[in-house]
């Protein structure tokens, strides 16, 4: 049986990715450059991501708020280091009215704003302005805030979910009395992201600290969770920043200490975005389309009735309705089962393959013979084929209903295990020189598509400033970047592969999205 | 006991409103003109509004999506009637980069967009562009879509929640094969809004059709639910529009019928916004602050421990923790109880009054005497006072826990009943001439604040065009508007109060937000 997509991962990974996004009905490009339309199936995944992560954010003591999407230009001018990192890519509102002039609708030249407004690329500056009013005393601390919002960064090479001009995210912003507490917050949220990625997205990640040159503009330290895509590239899945007192000083976020002194707050910020959906696709997708972990599948079990415009259709439909009701009363680890009976006026084979491409974890087909025997025939999307052959199982209806929750839990665990063994098997730590790394990744960046390359773990001496810039240049020639220094480090390190100096930590090198 | 707010409804209703928004920690103005910061308590209310309404929208067959926030200028130019209604109030993005020139951060003059982008004031045009691609055949219909999003309309006189430049809403957009189906959809969603307002917000509304001059730009007919605020003014709480084929024609949304013809779709749109929060405040608030219906109270029961920095504090806290756990295992009509134990380092009296102002439905205070007796002392926020005296009840702990769910249901019902009797009592239908209406509302618009004025129900001949414009002018002189023609109409009508011609329907006149 041919694969359900027109292109395989091996043939062309970037095209395969776009084929999954399209054929799984996740999203599409809009008429606005770089901005996507998220379709119902893709949006359903994002809603489930939001719902679970929101719970985790609240359980760690944060409250949701909402801040304006527009940022006055002067706010950005306050934090020079911050704006330097973003200045090249913002949407700027300069006028507040359109007008029909000589029959043509256009920007009203008389309606120029006194001060341009920037559509938030991130909200540190506008939230800082608010924090400065909310924080007066040590009693107001810690201030633990999150918002779900759309943000805009003008992207030159947009790609659905991975890099879009407008994207959706949550951004946490907190203020603390001292560095220790702010750093603990930064690490707590990194760990929330790690657990969320692994437990809910079934996507293994490496948590670690970014090198100096990869820090968030204005941050003292930036941490990330990095996931490995099936082409071996890294995807930065979430970041958590300790901002020191930089933003507090720029925005005058001060508090009175218990002994009456004035002190600047230590702030943090952290976020994940709709990019996670791209990560899920490139972690779990196969040549038949998407495979969704049950935790984030808008429909975990889809029932396709095999109708033939014959009298027995009524029996098939009644059987399916009863099956749906029975399944909806069951639970898996992630709550009550989400079940769809697909009654659309399409051929059942077409519907089956639509759900394969969309990645529904369990697809049930019911025909007259199943009804007669009291059976169901179903496919596990995580184990769709044996070689080229599509696998279907038959079970007695009551037994299937009874075990459906456990089966979904097993699918979730299986998808994680599969991704985790690929993740673990593809981080090489036996390349001890820069030459060996170059030989592994190919003599030049031109060989990028020449087979699967994973990540490389090496020791380095953590060079800074100009020395780090040289390392960056050296890596860039091979399209490599430093992903992070994993939190868990070995007791000893090799010599630095870049400088030959004694190594002080291990870092991960990879090509990346 | 003095009231908890610095201004009463009677003294100055607009100032009272702002005092509630501020003292109940709902929202505040930001540094960006017309844009508000929604604070955690206000956001919690909005989250609960979203959650319940989203369920109703999904139960009626709609799927959520997300569309870009930017709309190309040419899209707006396509629908002349539509843009005419909005042209005066949009945020326009003209540039995509900032740059530091001569040390000053400014809009980069070299980064002008080829085509200006408008921040969506509503999404008919951008969604229509998508529908035109999604709809090919009658099999694709109906197409039933909703999105939760931020939108921007430049407001000259912003007011927190009621009229802000950026606001949050849901906007439903649907496409249908014919008028009958599209009209049924329009009415279904109006009814969803009516039920939602009454059951969840405990806010009585009148559902009806807007007159021609109050239609949404580009609509064939517009329906609304109108709520009555405590100053007698009307608040348009939600709208539902039948758009005919106007947008379909402008955007070429066509489908192939079963017999192979091409036909334009009939479309609808409908929405409610964060303005509902303002409606809740002005429906239920009193001179002690907000009163929240339990269905949308982020915390339905707040426990305030009376701590005195003494050894018995530990017993009080332990007792409160046990009470919280017991309450959290209980349910009311709106799900598991949402309970907070307020341990903030403030005086218990201050905390109590904070929660009174914020409108928590039940406020429990626990002191050493309650612990000793196994009691709780609590206040119902909906019946806080008898005259000036604040009412507190004492109950045996287990009995209180047992009945807490029922008590919350009773508070929800009581708030609705109170609002409903005020609503019913203040729609006058005995004013049979325009002179009588003028006499009721006061000789001129200058008398606006001169005591409470409700709504007036009169018959009219439904004039159109210039005749309707004259009626509008006539009403405007007294700051009156036609709110809607209620769906339920009497069998017969009086003569039109404006023209003297035979009446064809009853309409509601009111001052409005």
Image: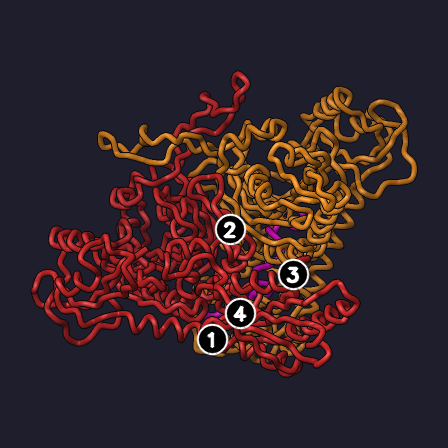
Chain colours: A red, B orange
Q: Chain of mark 4?
A: A
Q: Check if mark 2's residue and mark 4's residue have beta carbons within 8 Å.
A: no
Image depth: mark 3 or mark 2 in front: 3
Which residue is situated farthest in the right direction here? B492
Q: Is B466 situated above or below A437?
A: above
Distance (Cα) linking label 3 and label 2 = 26 Å
Residue A443 position by quadrant? bottom left
Q: Pointer 2: what residue?
A: A38
Asked if the magenta segment contains residue B295, the reply would be: yes
> Residue at 41% of width from left, 57% of height from top?
A16
* Residue closest to the far front: A1
Dots 1 and 4 on the same chain: yes
Which residue corresponds to mark 3? A347
Q: Earlier in the sequence, mark 1 or mark 2?
A: 2
The residue positioned farthest toward the top in the image shown: A102
Is residue A179 shown to the viewer in this render? yes
Precedes in sequence: disc 4 or disc 3: 3
Q: How far is disc 4 from disc 3 in space, using C-alphas? A: 20 Å
Whether labels 3 and 2 belong to a single chain: the reply is: yes
Nearest the eye: B263 or B388? B263
Residue A32, horizontal then vertical, whole percent = 46, 39
Q: Are marks 1 and 2 in contact (CB under 8 Å)?
A: no
Q: CA distance from mark 2 to mark 4?
A: 21 Å
Where disc 1 sits, the SS reads: strand
The relative height of residue A458 versus residue B422 in the rendered view (above or below) is below
């Amino acid at each position: 049986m041919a694969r359900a997509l027109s292109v395989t991962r091996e043939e062309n990974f970037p095209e395969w990715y776009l084929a999954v996004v399209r054929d799984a009905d996740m999203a599409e490009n809009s008429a606005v450059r770089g901005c996507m339309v998220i379709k119902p199936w893709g949006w359903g995944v994002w809603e489930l991501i939001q719902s679970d992560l929101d719970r985790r954010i609240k359980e760690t003591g944060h409250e949701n708020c909402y801040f304006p999407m527009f940022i006055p230009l002067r706010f950005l001018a306050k934090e020079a280091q911050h704006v330097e990192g973003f200045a090249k890519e913002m949407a700027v509102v300069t006028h507040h009215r359109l007008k029909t002039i000589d029959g043509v609708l256009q920007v009203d030249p008389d309606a120029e704003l006194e001060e341009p407004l920037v559509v938030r690329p991130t909200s540190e500056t506008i939230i800082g302005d608010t924090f400065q009013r909310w924080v007066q005393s040590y009693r107001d601390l810690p201030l633990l805030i999150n918002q779900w919002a759309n943000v805009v960064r003008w992207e030159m090479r947009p790609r659905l979910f991975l890099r879009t001009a407008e994207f959706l995210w949550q951004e946490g912003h907190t203020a603390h009395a001292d560095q220790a507490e702010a750093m603990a917050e930064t690490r707590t949220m990194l760990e929330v992201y790690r657990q969320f990625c692994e437990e809910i997205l079934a996507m293994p990640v490496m948590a670690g600290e970014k090198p100096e040159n990869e820090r968030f503009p204005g941050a003292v330290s930036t941490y990330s969770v990095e996931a490995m895509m099936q082409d071996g590239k890294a995807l930065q899945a979430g970041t958590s920043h300790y901002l020191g007192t930089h933003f507090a000083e720029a925005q005058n976020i001060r508090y009175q200490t218990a002994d009456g002194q004035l002190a600047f707050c230590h702030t943090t910020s952290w976020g994940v975005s709709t990019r996670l959906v791209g990560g899920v696709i490139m972690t779990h997708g196969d040549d038949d389309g998407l495979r969704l972990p049950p935790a984030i599948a808008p429909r975990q079990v889809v029932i396709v009735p095999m109708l033939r415009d014959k009298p027995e259709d009524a029996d098939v439909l009644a059987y399916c309705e009863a099956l749906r009701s029975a399944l909806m009363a069951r639970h898996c680890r992630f709550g009550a089962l989400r079940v769809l009976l697909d009654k659309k006026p399409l051929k059942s084979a077409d519907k089956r393959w639509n759900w394969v491409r969309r990645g529904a974890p369990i697809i049930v087909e019911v025909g007259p013979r199943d009804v007669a025997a009291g059976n169901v025939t179903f496919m596990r999307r995580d184990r769709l084929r044996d070689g080229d052959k599509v696998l279907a199982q038959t079970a007695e209806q009551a037994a299937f209903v009874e075990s459906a929750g456990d089966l979904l839990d097993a699918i979730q665990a299986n998808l994680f295990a599969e991704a985790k063994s690929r993740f673990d098997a593809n981080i090489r730590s036996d390349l001890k020189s820069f030459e060996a790394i170059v030989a592994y990744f190919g003599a030049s960046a031109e060989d990028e598509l020449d087979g699967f390359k994973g990540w490389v773990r090496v020791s380095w001496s953590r060079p800074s400033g100009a020395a780090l810039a040289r390392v960056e240049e050296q890596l860039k020639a091979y399209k490599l970047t430093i992903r992070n220094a994993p939190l868990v480090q070995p007791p000893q390190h090799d010599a630095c592969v870049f400088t030959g100096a004694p190594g002080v930590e291990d870092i991960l090198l990879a090509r990346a999205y």
